Image (cartoon, helix red, strand yellow):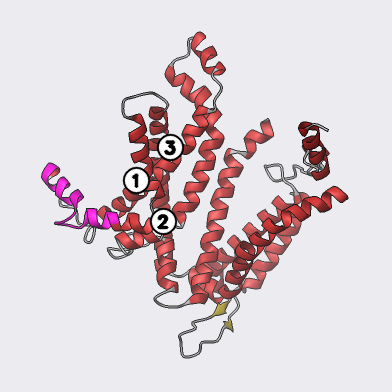
Amino acid sequence: MHSNKLGWLLLAPTLLVLFFFGVLPFIYVVYVSFHQWNPFAVNPDMVFNWAENYRRVVFDAQFLASLGVTAAFVFFAVISELILGYLLAQAFMKDFPGKAIFRTIHTLPLIMAPIIVGSIWKLMTTPSIGIIPNLLDSWFGYNLNIGQSAIAAFITTVVMDIWHWTPLVTLTLIAALVSLPPDPFEQAQIDGAGKRQIFWHITLPMIRPAILATVFIRLMDALRTVDEVLMLTGGGPGSATRYVGVHIFKEVFPRTNYGYGSAISVIVLYLTIVVCWLLYVFLIAPRNKKG
Amino acid sequence: MTDLEELGDMDEKLNLHEADAPPEETKTGFLPIQTNWFDRLFISVVIWVALSLIWFRFIEPFGPSIWISNAIALALAVLIITKG
Protein backbone atom coordinates (compact mmCIF):
# COMPACT_ATOMS: atom_id res chain seq x y z
CA MET A 1 0.00 0.00 0.00
CA HIS A 2 2.84 2.31 1.02
CA SER A 3 4.73 1.62 -2.23
CA ASN A 4 1.61 2.35 -4.30
CA LYS A 5 1.19 5.71 -2.59
CA LEU A 6 4.82 6.59 -3.24
CA GLY A 7 4.45 5.55 -6.89
CA TRP A 8 1.37 7.74 -7.40
CA LEU A 9 3.09 10.63 -5.59
CA LEU A 10 6.07 10.43 -7.95
CA LEU A 11 3.77 10.19 -10.97
CA ALA A 12 1.52 13.05 -9.82
CA PRO A 13 3.46 15.99 -11.43
CA THR A 14 3.52 14.25 -14.83
CA LEU A 15 -0.14 13.28 -14.58
CA LEU A 16 -1.11 16.83 -13.59
CA VAL A 17 0.79 18.35 -16.53
CA LEU A 18 -0.74 15.75 -18.86
CA PHE A 19 -4.22 16.47 -17.50
CA PHE A 20 -4.00 20.27 -17.75
CA PHE A 21 -2.21 20.47 -21.09
CA GLY A 22 -3.53 17.33 -22.81
CA VAL A 23 -6.79 15.99 -21.43
CA LEU A 24 -8.46 19.27 -20.42
CA PRO A 25 -7.97 21.02 -23.83
CA PHE A 26 -9.27 17.88 -25.54
CA ILE A 27 -12.39 17.84 -23.37
CA TYR A 28 -12.86 21.57 -24.08
CA VAL A 29 -12.58 21.02 -27.86
CA VAL A 30 -15.18 18.23 -27.66
CA TYR A 31 -17.41 20.59 -25.59
CA VAL A 32 -17.01 23.43 -28.11
CA SER A 33 -17.73 21.04 -31.00
CA PHE A 34 -21.29 20.65 -29.73
CA HIS A 35 -21.88 24.41 -29.86
CA GLN A 36 -22.52 27.09 -32.43
CA TRP A 37 -19.80 29.56 -31.48
CA ASN A 38 -18.47 32.46 -33.49
CA PRO A 39 -17.16 35.03 -30.98
CA PHE A 40 -16.94 37.73 -33.66
CA ALA A 41 -20.46 37.25 -35.05
CA VAL A 42 -23.57 39.31 -34.19
CA ASN A 43 -24.37 36.76 -31.49
CA PRO A 44 -21.00 35.91 -29.90
CA ASP A 45 -22.48 33.52 -27.31
CA MET A 46 -21.93 29.78 -27.30
CA VAL A 47 -25.20 28.11 -28.29
CA PHE A 48 -25.57 24.40 -27.65
CA ASN A 49 -26.69 22.81 -30.93
CA TRP A 50 -26.46 19.09 -30.20
CA ALA A 51 -24.56 17.31 -33.00
CA GLU A 52 -25.40 19.88 -35.68
CA ASN A 53 -21.70 20.55 -36.41
CA TYR A 54 -21.07 16.82 -36.96
CA ARG A 55 -24.15 16.60 -39.16
CA ARG A 56 -22.72 19.47 -41.21
CA VAL A 57 -19.23 17.89 -41.41
CA VAL A 58 -20.42 14.71 -43.14
CA PHE A 59 -22.05 16.79 -45.89
CA ASP A 60 -19.15 19.26 -46.24
CA ALA A 61 -17.84 18.49 -49.75
CA GLN A 62 -14.71 20.55 -49.18
CA PHE A 63 -13.88 18.62 -46.00
CA LEU A 64 -14.48 15.25 -47.68
CA ALA A 65 -12.27 16.33 -50.60
CA SER A 66 -9.58 17.45 -48.15
CA LEU A 67 -9.73 14.02 -46.49
CA GLY A 68 -9.07 12.42 -49.89
CA VAL A 69 -6.05 14.58 -50.73
CA THR A 70 -4.73 14.15 -47.18
CA ALA A 71 -4.94 10.36 -47.52
CA ALA A 72 -3.00 10.53 -50.81
CA PHE A 73 -0.46 12.92 -49.29
CA VAL A 74 0.07 10.71 -46.22
CA PHE A 75 0.35 7.55 -48.31
CA PHE A 76 2.95 8.87 -50.76
CA ALA A 77 4.92 10.85 -48.17
CA VAL A 78 5.17 8.12 -45.51
CA ILE A 79 5.96 5.29 -47.95
CA SER A 80 8.64 7.36 -49.71
CA GLU A 81 10.17 8.49 -46.41
CA LEU A 82 10.28 4.92 -45.16
CA ILE A 83 12.01 3.55 -48.27
CA LEU A 84 14.43 6.48 -48.60
CA GLY A 85 15.08 6.54 -44.86
CA TYR A 86 15.92 2.83 -44.84
CA LEU A 87 18.25 3.12 -47.85
CA LEU A 88 20.03 6.10 -46.26
CA ALA A 89 20.28 4.30 -42.90
CA GLN A 90 21.90 1.33 -44.66
CA ALA A 91 24.27 3.73 -46.45
CA PHE A 92 25.23 5.37 -43.15
CA MET A 93 26.02 1.93 -41.68
CA LYS A 94 28.96 1.75 -44.09
CA ASP A 95 32.07 3.93 -44.07
CA PHE A 96 32.61 6.31 -46.97
CA PRO A 97 34.57 9.55 -47.42
CA GLY A 98 32.72 12.63 -46.11
CA LYS A 99 30.21 10.50 -44.20
CA ALA A 100 30.16 12.81 -41.13
CA ILE A 101 29.56 15.95 -43.22
CA PHE A 102 26.90 14.25 -45.36
CA ARG A 103 25.11 12.98 -42.26
CA THR A 104 25.09 16.47 -40.73
CA ILE A 105 23.78 18.08 -43.92
CA HIS A 106 21.21 15.31 -44.29
CA THR A 107 19.94 15.94 -40.73
CA LEU A 108 19.70 19.74 -41.08
CA PRO A 109 16.08 19.88 -42.39
CA LEU A 110 14.96 18.07 -39.26
CA ILE A 111 15.94 20.96 -37.00
CA MET A 112 14.11 23.56 -39.09
CA ALA A 113 10.71 24.89 -38.08
CA PRO A 114 8.00 23.86 -40.59
CA ILE A 115 7.22 27.50 -41.36
CA ILE A 116 10.88 28.02 -42.39
CA VAL A 117 10.76 24.89 -44.54
CA GLY A 118 7.62 26.24 -46.23
CA SER A 119 9.31 29.63 -46.85
CA ILE A 120 12.45 28.01 -48.30
CA TRP A 121 10.43 25.82 -50.64
CA LYS A 122 8.27 28.79 -51.61
CA LEU A 123 11.43 30.65 -52.64
CA MET A 124 12.84 27.59 -54.41
CA THR A 125 9.67 26.92 -56.41
CA THR A 126 8.59 30.45 -57.35
CA PRO A 127 8.60 30.63 -61.16
CA SER A 128 11.37 32.81 -62.69
CA ILE A 129 13.30 33.29 -59.42
CA GLY A 130 13.25 29.79 -57.91
CA ILE A 131 16.09 27.35 -58.53
CA ILE A 132 13.81 24.32 -59.05
CA PRO A 133 11.71 25.75 -61.94
CA ASN A 134 14.90 27.08 -63.54
CA LEU A 135 16.69 23.74 -63.36
CA LEU A 136 13.64 21.77 -64.51
CA ASP A 137 13.23 24.17 -67.42
CA SER A 138 16.88 24.00 -68.52
CA TRP A 139 17.25 20.23 -68.04
CA PHE A 140 13.89 18.87 -69.16
CA GLY A 141 12.08 21.86 -70.68
CA TYR A 142 9.39 21.45 -67.97
CA ASN A 143 7.66 24.59 -66.78
CA LEU A 144 6.96 24.12 -63.06
CA ASN A 145 4.31 26.44 -61.75
CA ILE A 146 2.75 25.28 -58.50
CA GLY A 147 0.37 28.23 -58.56
CA GLN A 148 -1.31 26.84 -61.68
CA SER A 149 -0.83 23.07 -61.78
CA ALA A 150 -2.68 21.08 -59.12
CA ILE A 151 -0.60 17.94 -59.68
CA ALA A 152 2.67 19.90 -59.51
CA ALA A 153 1.55 21.58 -56.28
CA PHE A 154 0.57 18.25 -54.74
CA ILE A 155 3.85 16.57 -55.75
CA THR A 156 5.86 19.55 -54.47
CA THR A 157 4.22 19.34 -51.03
CA VAL A 158 4.95 15.59 -50.90
CA VAL A 159 8.59 16.16 -51.92
CA MET A 160 8.90 18.95 -49.35
CA ASP A 161 7.58 16.64 -46.63
CA ILE A 162 9.98 13.90 -47.73
CA TRP A 163 12.87 16.40 -47.66
CA HIS A 164 11.86 17.57 -44.20
CA TRP A 165 11.13 14.29 -42.46
CA THR A 166 13.24 11.57 -44.10
CA PRO A 167 16.15 12.35 -41.69
CA LEU A 168 13.91 11.39 -38.75
CA VAL A 169 13.21 8.00 -40.33
CA THR A 170 16.92 7.58 -41.15
CA LEU A 171 18.01 8.34 -37.57
CA THR A 172 15.42 5.98 -36.08
CA LEU A 173 16.36 3.17 -38.44
CA ILE A 174 20.11 3.73 -37.89
CA ALA A 175 19.47 3.32 -34.14
CA ALA A 176 17.56 0.10 -34.85
CA LEU A 177 20.19 -1.27 -37.26
CA VAL A 178 23.08 -0.48 -34.90
CA SER A 179 21.40 -2.34 -32.06
CA LEU A 180 20.96 -5.58 -34.08
CA PRO A 181 23.07 -8.49 -32.78
CA PRO A 182 25.63 -9.73 -35.37
CA ASP A 183 25.13 -13.46 -34.64
CA PRO A 184 22.01 -14.14 -36.77
CA PHE A 185 23.62 -12.40 -39.76
CA GLU A 186 26.84 -14.39 -39.41
CA GLN A 187 24.85 -17.59 -39.02
CA ALA A 188 22.79 -16.80 -42.13
CA GLN A 189 25.92 -16.05 -44.14
CA ILE A 190 27.49 -19.35 -43.03
CA ASP A 191 24.28 -21.12 -44.10
CA GLY A 192 24.63 -19.52 -47.51
CA ALA A 193 21.75 -17.01 -47.35
CA GLY A 194 21.81 -14.26 -49.98
CA LYS A 195 21.50 -10.51 -49.28
CA ARG A 196 17.84 -10.50 -50.25
CA GLN A 197 17.03 -13.45 -48.00
CA ILE A 198 18.91 -11.83 -45.11
CA PHE A 199 16.93 -8.63 -45.63
CA TRP A 200 13.49 -10.29 -45.80
CA HIS A 201 13.99 -12.95 -43.12
CA ILE A 202 16.36 -11.33 -40.61
CA THR A 203 16.79 -7.57 -40.95
CA LEU A 204 13.18 -6.66 -41.66
CA PRO A 205 11.58 -8.77 -38.87
CA MET A 206 14.18 -7.54 -36.37
CA ILE A 207 13.71 -3.83 -37.12
CA ARG A 208 9.94 -4.18 -37.48
CA PRO A 209 9.14 -2.49 -34.14
CA ALA A 210 11.29 0.52 -35.10
CA ILE A 211 9.66 0.70 -38.55
CA LEU A 212 6.18 0.58 -37.02
CA ALA A 213 7.01 3.22 -34.42
CA THR A 214 8.36 5.47 -37.20
CA VAL A 215 5.28 4.88 -39.35
CA PHE A 216 3.01 5.79 -36.41
CA ILE A 217 4.93 9.00 -35.72
CA ARG A 218 5.07 10.03 -39.38
CA LEU A 219 1.45 9.10 -39.98
CA MET A 220 0.25 11.28 -37.11
CA ASP A 221 2.55 14.13 -38.14
CA ALA A 222 1.58 13.97 -41.82
CA LEU A 223 -2.14 13.98 -40.95
CA ARG A 224 -1.76 17.28 -39.10
CA THR A 225 0.48 19.04 -41.63
CA VAL A 226 -0.51 22.68 -41.76
CA ASP A 227 2.16 25.35 -41.60
CA GLU A 228 4.59 24.29 -44.31
CA VAL A 229 1.80 23.63 -46.82
CA LEU A 230 0.03 26.85 -45.88
CA MET A 231 3.29 28.72 -46.46
CA LEU A 232 4.07 26.97 -49.76
CA THR A 233 0.73 26.75 -51.55
CA GLY A 234 -1.87 28.21 -49.17
CA GLY A 235 -3.92 25.07 -49.86
CA GLY A 236 -4.14 25.79 -53.59
CA PRO A 237 -4.35 25.93 -56.50
CA GLY A 238 -8.09 25.54 -55.94
CA SER A 239 -8.16 22.98 -53.16
CA ALA A 240 -5.47 20.65 -54.56
CA THR A 241 -3.33 20.86 -51.41
CA ARG A 242 -6.05 21.77 -48.93
CA TYR A 243 -5.15 19.03 -46.46
CA VAL A 244 -7.37 18.57 -43.39
CA GLY A 245 -5.05 20.64 -41.20
CA VAL A 246 -5.17 23.50 -43.70
CA HIS A 247 -8.95 23.10 -43.98
CA ILE A 248 -9.34 23.34 -40.18
CA PHE A 249 -7.05 26.38 -40.10
CA LYS A 250 -9.09 28.14 -42.78
CA GLU A 251 -12.35 27.27 -41.06
CA VAL A 252 -11.22 28.34 -37.58
CA PHE A 253 -9.07 31.42 -38.12
CA PRO A 254 -10.26 33.50 -41.07
CA ARG A 255 -13.92 32.51 -40.50
CA THR A 256 -13.64 32.29 -36.66
CA ASN A 257 -16.07 29.38 -36.79
CA TYR A 258 -14.83 27.71 -33.60
CA GLY A 259 -17.66 25.25 -33.04
CA TYR A 260 -17.52 23.79 -36.55
CA GLY A 261 -13.70 23.83 -36.60
CA SER A 262 -13.66 21.91 -33.31
CA ALA A 263 -16.03 19.29 -34.74
CA ILE A 264 -13.70 18.78 -37.73
CA SER A 265 -10.71 18.58 -35.38
CA VAL A 266 -12.42 15.89 -33.29
CA ILE A 267 -13.24 13.86 -36.41
CA VAL A 268 -9.66 14.15 -37.69
CA LEU A 269 -8.35 13.05 -34.28
CA TYR A 270 -10.84 10.15 -34.35
CA LEU A 271 -9.65 9.09 -37.82
CA THR A 272 -5.99 9.34 -36.77
CA ILE A 273 -6.59 7.17 -33.71
CA VAL A 274 -8.58 4.62 -35.73
CA VAL A 275 -5.92 4.37 -38.47
CA CYS A 276 -3.12 3.92 -35.90
CA TRP A 277 -5.18 1.42 -33.94
CA LEU A 278 -5.96 -0.62 -37.07
CA LEU A 279 -2.26 -0.63 -37.95
CA TYR A 280 -1.50 -1.81 -34.42
CA VAL A 281 -4.17 -4.52 -34.47
CA PHE A 282 -3.17 -5.94 -37.86
CA LEU A 283 0.61 -5.57 -37.62
CA ILE A 284 1.58 -5.86 -33.95
CA ALA A 285 -1.19 -7.61 -32.01
CA PRO A 286 -1.19 -10.89 -34.06
CA ARG A 287 2.58 -11.14 -33.59
CA ASN A 288 2.28 -10.66 -29.81
CA LYS A 289 -0.45 -13.28 -29.70
CA LYS A 290 1.80 -15.79 -31.46
CA GLY A 291 4.72 -14.94 -29.20
CA MET B 1 24.13 -1.45 2.05
CA THR B 2 25.77 -1.24 -1.42
CA ASP B 3 24.44 0.96 -4.21
CA LEU B 4 23.00 -2.04 -6.06
CA GLU B 5 21.21 -3.30 -2.95
CA GLU B 6 19.84 0.18 -2.40
CA LEU B 7 18.53 0.26 -5.99
CA GLY B 8 16.94 -3.15 -5.53
CA ASP B 9 15.28 -1.92 -2.36
CA MET B 10 13.95 1.15 -4.21
CA ASP B 11 12.55 -1.10 -6.97
CA GLU B 12 10.69 -3.06 -4.36
CA LYS B 13 9.29 0.10 -2.78
CA LEU B 14 8.11 1.39 -6.14
CA ASN B 15 6.75 -2.02 -7.18
CA LEU B 16 8.68 -1.87 -10.45
CA HIS B 17 9.02 -5.62 -10.92
CA GLU B 18 6.70 -6.85 -13.62
CA ALA B 19 6.21 -10.10 -11.74
CA ASP B 20 4.78 -8.16 -8.79
CA ALA B 21 2.29 -6.25 -10.96
CA PRO B 22 -1.25 -7.63 -11.03
CA PRO B 23 -1.83 -9.78 -14.12
CA GLU B 24 -3.72 -8.03 -16.92
CA GLU B 25 -7.09 -9.64 -17.46
CA THR B 26 -7.31 -10.35 -21.18
CA LYS B 27 -9.71 -12.66 -22.97
CA THR B 28 -10.66 -13.84 -26.43
CA GLY B 29 -14.39 -13.59 -27.15
CA PHE B 30 -16.00 -13.20 -30.56
CA LEU B 31 -13.53 -10.41 -31.44
CA PRO B 32 -10.58 -11.73 -33.47
CA ILE B 33 -8.01 -10.28 -31.02
CA GLN B 34 -7.21 -10.68 -27.34
CA THR B 35 -8.64 -7.71 -25.45
CA ASN B 36 -8.94 -6.29 -21.95
CA TRP B 37 -11.99 -4.31 -20.76
CA PHE B 38 -10.48 -0.98 -21.87
CA ASP B 39 -9.83 -2.30 -25.41
CA ARG B 40 -13.44 -3.41 -25.64
CA LEU B 41 -14.68 -0.02 -24.36
CA PHE B 42 -12.44 1.69 -26.93
CA ILE B 43 -13.76 -0.52 -29.76
CA SER B 44 -17.32 0.30 -28.64
CA VAL B 45 -16.65 4.06 -28.73
CA VAL B 46 -14.99 3.77 -32.17
CA ILE B 47 -18.03 1.87 -33.49
CA TRP B 48 -20.44 4.35 -31.86
CA VAL B 49 -18.77 7.36 -33.54
CA ALA B 50 -18.49 5.60 -36.93
CA LEU B 51 -22.12 4.47 -36.79
CA SER B 52 -23.30 7.98 -35.86
CA LEU B 53 -21.38 9.60 -38.72
CA ILE B 54 -22.63 7.03 -41.24
CA TRP B 55 -26.17 7.49 -39.91
CA PHE B 56 -25.94 11.29 -40.31
CA ARG B 57 -24.70 10.95 -43.86
CA PHE B 58 -26.76 8.12 -45.32
CA ILE B 59 -29.74 7.22 -43.13
CA GLU B 60 -30.96 10.33 -41.32
CA PRO B 61 -31.87 12.16 -44.58
CA PHE B 62 -34.55 9.44 -45.09
CA GLY B 63 -36.12 10.05 -41.68
CA PRO B 64 -34.85 7.69 -38.94
CA SER B 65 -33.61 9.65 -35.91
CA ILE B 66 -30.00 9.55 -34.69
CA TRP B 67 -31.30 8.15 -31.37
CA ILE B 68 -31.92 4.82 -33.13
CA SER B 69 -28.24 4.73 -34.07
CA ASN B 70 -27.31 5.57 -30.47
CA ALA B 71 -29.50 2.74 -29.18
CA ILE B 72 -27.91 0.27 -31.63
CA ALA B 73 -24.44 1.50 -30.64
CA LEU B 74 -25.28 1.10 -26.94
CA ALA B 75 -26.56 -2.45 -27.48
CA LEU B 76 -23.41 -3.27 -29.47
CA ALA B 77 -21.25 -1.76 -26.72
CA VAL B 78 -22.88 -3.95 -24.07
CA LEU B 79 -22.41 -7.00 -26.30
CA ILE B 80 -18.76 -6.18 -27.06
CA ILE B 81 -17.83 -5.37 -23.46
CA THR B 82 -19.43 -8.50 -22.04
CA LYS B 83 -18.84 -11.06 -24.81
CA GLY B 84 -16.12 -9.54 -27.02
Reading the image, the residue beneath label 3 is A170
Q: Does residue A140 appear left or right of residue A209 in this picture?
A: left
Q: Does residue A288 appear left or right of residue A36 in this picture?
A: right
Q: Residue at x 53, y 57 (%)?
A: A271
Q: Is residue A142 visible?
A: no
* Residue A78 counted in the magenta span: no
Residue type beneath disc 3: Thr
Q: Does residue B37 appear left or right of residue A149 in this picture?
A: right
Nearest the viewer among B48 and A265 is A265
Q: Which mark is residue A163?
A: 1
Q: Does residue A97 appear left or right of residue B48 in this picture?
A: left
A214 shown above or below A71: above
* Residue A128 counted in the magenta span: yes
- The chain ID associated with circle 1 is A
Residue range in magenta is: A120-139
Q: Which mark is residue A197?
A: none
Packing grade of label 2 (10 A; few <14, some 14-19, many >=20) is many
Q: Is residue A269 visible?
A: yes
In the rendering, at what x and y percent does residue A211 appear?
A: 51, 37
In the rendering, at what x and y percent does residue A99 appear?
A: 35, 30
Query: Which element carries disc 2, helix, strand or loop?
Result: helix
Q: Residue at x 51, y 9 (%)?
A: A190
